Image (cartoon, helix red, strand yellow):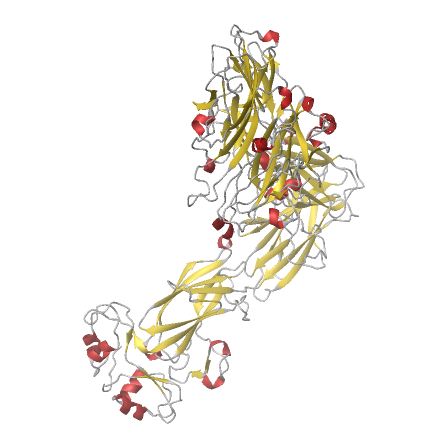
Amino acid sequence: RGVMAAGGVKVVLLLAMGTLARSDFSTYRYAKITWASCARFYDPLFPKACQAKDTSATGSALGIGVTVSAAWDIRDLSTTSMITKDDATNAITSFLENGKLSSTYLPLRRGDSMGKYRKIGYRALDATSVTDVDCSIDECGSDAYHFKIDHLSPDGNVFFCRFSFTASLSSQSTVHLLQFMGCCRLDRYSYQNLALSSAQSSFEISATVVTNGLSPIDTISPQISAPYLVNLTSTANLCTPPSFDLQAFHPLDSFQLDYINYFPSTKLDLNAGKFVFSSCESNTGDYWWVAKVEVQNTLTCGKATGTENMCASAVIDFLIHLKVLPTSTVYSLPIVANPDSFLSPLTSRDQFFSIQCNTETFEFSNAKTNNLRIGFQTPGVSLSNNSLQWIFQNNDFPSITISSVKFASEYGFVELTWRPHCEDPSQLGLFLLCFTARLFDYNSVPGFSSCIYVKSLPPLPNPPPEIVYPIQQTCSSDCVSCCGEFNCTLQNNATCCKRAHAIRGASFQMDVKAITQNYVQRVDVNFSYPEIALPVKADITKKWGCGSTPFDQCTSSPATSNDVTVRFSYPAGHDEISGIYKICYQAVQVTDPQVDNELWTRFYGGTYTLNSCIVCISLRIESEPFFVESTLMQEGSTDNSVTIGLAVGRTLRINLLAAYNMGGSTAKLDIFPLSEPGLPSGGVLSLTKQINLTGSSVPVAFQRSFEFTPHVGQQAQTFYVCFAAKRTDIALQTPLNRCYMIQVYEATVFWTAEKVGVMNVKGLRYLEDTVTVGCPVSYNVFAKSSLYSIQLEPDYNSSCTACSENGSYVIPFCSIDPSLLTCCGNGKCDGFETGISCPVDCQGDNFDLQELVLGSSDNEYTSSFQFSWTPKADMRGRKVYSCFLAKDTVSGTGAIFQKRAASTAPSFCFVFDVEKCSFCLGGGSTFERITRTFLFNHDWLLLYNSNPDVKNPDSIPAETRLVIGPTYTVKRGDTVMSIAAWAKTTVKGILDHNPDMADPDQLPPGSTVCLAVCSQAASYQW
């Protein structure tokens, strides 16, 4: 209430004054124009609006939906009115019979002799003509706009209708000024008064927003609430100034209306939020005015930088009727009833009623109701006289149902009920709902309306529903139901269905529980038979709201729709049913018949309802004796499938349980393996023993355990084992078999590695890196192999084809030019050799290998290691390599797959390119000490000049890479002696600095030589 005083709007109020009779306003009572961007626009009476095939209208950032609302009094219409009386009568009759679903429309015919009346359209600021509605994409005809009725006045005489269409704003204009030309109020209006008879709403959009490809109007227009007819009462001579309220607000917080600006008239002022007549009429009688109000959210809309896309406006016009009564008249106007929680409550845009879409419950201050009351009372007038003629809405409401006037002891009221549709954006957001009351005696309304803020909340997050019982059920629509039967094959890594058992001729039941986190949605469970249907019809019993209460103890509460427990069962007595049946179930959200799924997809994508994945079981209906579900025990885990993966050296135990309905019999069961296919080598069976199954439907069973530990040589093989059970007291039986497929995996190792502290040095099955003598390097290595725990050990024999009786080539992966091969065992550490790859020729390497994490089921069998290594001086200029073998903690290297592939291999190798003319030392050294201790006869100033990045020659940080000197590229005809003479050094100095030089007498052209220029022979003590 009083929104204009506190909220602030730009108001343009135009008044046409005169003492006109009511009949002079014969064809037009009320007009309002609102709009919204197509991204959020929807009008259920005009579903095609903003859904045009023309993408320029709806697909661009400038597509908007526009609604023009109007009202006529059928008593004022004739055959020459803009809406004829016959058309109105037909439309009202159809509306009363079919409601808003009526297909009958009101034709508002275009134009008249002056060519400007009755035209609905828009234009840009720089356009010279108005763009008319495009009837190829909107609901109109060549000669008329098709209005549809929204609601009727309480007396049924005034019909409120609207027309919605699509506007496609041009992106070529600098500023857009949209003018929605309403239509003419009177056939007999003079041309000069045309401006007063057309409703126009305007706002501006900067072209920069358009050219940036952004949505300039991803919003909606302000909302205005006012009676279609303002009835005011005053008395002559006493001159009590009558007043009335208008309510205006914007649903979005970023568009709050924050100031007041209006054009005053000689008869009307804005005072404390009310429109007040500044003078009064001394003569009794009726006075009429036409008022036009435009609301805009900001004075600088479209002008100030940063506000170009923050413009919004709406327009409304209405009639003002002032009834001047004799001075002696005593009258009383209705006032708002004293508010309580749900009777005309005091709300604001921050304290509002909320209602979750697709529900029917209003909430306010921790109270809830499905019926919201708006009440008025008339001081001094007994309500038993029914002095309140009606309570009526000031503005169009989104599908809210309003009851007829009801009376309590001190007030009259109407009740509001509403179920806002989530898929309809016109029913979401903040609304200001306003009402006025009318008396029988004075045809008047209160000085201000009763208004409440109601916010319809958007859809809740809607994750798929879940199956929560039976526990640990996983998605299994593709599972194989025949597992456990001989010759049952699994293809493409398919899994076996979980098993359930039923005794032939006995009853069976299974409970399934499903929930959904969205309390608005209703959840259910559907069953299906993807292979063979049960020959007997199953009973499906459902209970909602059980929570953790067992099914038999639960009383169903259908109101708690997001929790359902379903019992699947069939009765005893069906001896003819046996075999294996695949039964699948799925949690589903129930389709709400009131939800328009096509509309939901339009605004949200996807569908309104979601389903869980499908869970399937294999129901085995078996004659006695039968196998009870087996339990597999491997490293402390359990697995109910009958396809078993196993690693070499690990023990598999299958507890075989069989039972029968003993009924007083003391006969035992014998569990035995079938001769075909038999037991694998190493398989062992325990003796059969009788056990009690506490809490089971089968209290007594017989157990025999089968154990199998595969050995090296059995990897990469598949073994089948089958078992049967029979009673010892009956000779002729056809026992039911239980079969298992055991896959013994080979240890195929997947490798990755990375250099510690360096992101771009990585490798699969090997890693290459450039290193420097004396500079330590570290690498993280990861080895993953399903079911195997991998460890690493140095590969001291990483060689290929033999090159002598006692030696072999040392070469990574045997893939480099044979002419470059060097022999391990020739007594010289050269070529690719290191202390790891060829310990017979090379001294031990300075390396460390640490196991960080051992692979297990907790980390998907991924082991991690850190390898640290420091290159030695005799490796300078060489490409060397070191490999590490993968081995299993149980079976060693025997089960490791030996072939190399893109990312798998039996070992991981490091290939190091050791820099030729550089080295690293520990911290604290000086250039003088280095040349005196390590590089005899080398001038420390020359070494200093070769390392310009070292700032202080007397304090060199640890692991600083130092360059000995330049490198020389060998040309054809060069010798060691000629190079030494040119560099002013010695032959011995060159040989000392180039330990990789295989033959000093034959220097390959293009090879490089490290030089310590202007020096004598060096003497190293590394």
Give the residue at x 35% y 68%.
777
Judge by depth and name the residue closer to the eye, 56 or 687.
56
Q: Position of residue 927 (x, y in %)?
A: 21, 75
Give the residue at x 68% y 58%.
491
Instruction: Please say if 685 is above or below 753.
Output: above
Residue 341 visible, this orientation: yes
- Left or right of 224? Residue 622 is right
Hey, which quadrant is residue 465 in on the image?
top right
Give the residue at x 43% y 27%.
6
Q: Which quadrant of the rendered structure holds the C terminus? A: bottom left
Give the residue at x 50% y 29%.
13
- Left or right of 563? Residue 810 is left
Instruction: Please say if 193 is above or below 635.
Output: above
- The single residue placed furthest to the bottom in the displayed view is 973
Q: Position of residue 312 (x, y in %)?
A: 50, 38
Instruction: Please say if 520 is above or below 124.
Output: above
Judge by depth and name the residue closer to the eye, 487 or 935.
935
Judge by depth and name the residue closer to the eye, 917 or 414.
414
- Left or right of 483? Residue 215 is left
Residue 421 visible, this orientation: no
Hey, which quadrant is residue 292 in on the image?
top right
Q: Position of residue 424 (x, y in %)?
A: 61, 37
